[in-house]
Image (cartoon, rainbow, N blue to C red):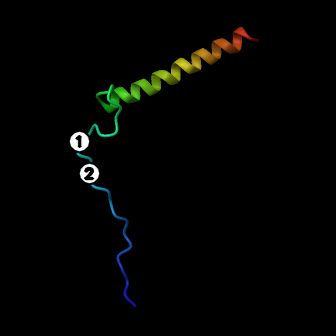
Amino acid sequence: MKITDQTPHSSPPPENKYEGLPPFIKTWPQMYGIVIGTLIVLIVLFYAMMHYFD
C-alpha cells in the first residue's frame, strides 16, 4: 500500500495585491473603510427609524 502526501495544495499567489477588488476601489484599506462606513450609516439609520416609528 502506497501512502501519498495528504497536504492541501496551496493556490498560486495572486498576480497583483489588488486582485478581487471592484474596479472603482483602488486599495484594500479603502474597501474596508467603505464596508465599515456603510455599516455605521445603516446602524444610525435603523436607530433613527426605531425612534421615529416608536
Q: Quadrant of the C terminus?
A: top right
Q: Looking at the picture, how far across and down is residue 42, in whole percent?
A: 56, 20
Q: Secondary structure at mark 2?
A: loop
Q: Secondary structure at mark 1?
A: loop
Q: Is residue 24 left or right of residue 50?
A: left
Q: Residue at x 36, y 80 (%)?
A: 4
| Residue furthest top in the image | 52
| Residue furthest bottom in the image | 1
Q: Which mark is residue 13?
A: 2
Q: Looking at the picture, how far across and down is residue 53, in whole percent?
A: 74, 11
Q: Quadrant of the N terminus?
A: bottom left
Q: Amino acid at mark 1?
A: Asn
For label 1, the crowd category at 10 Å Cα-Cα, with few meaning under 14, some 14 to 19 and many 20 or more, is: few
Q: Residue at x 26, y 40 (%)?
A: 17
Q: Amino acid at mark 2?
A: Pro
Residue under numbered circle 1: 16
Q: Residue at x 67, y 13 (%)?
A: 49
| Residue furthest left in the image | 15
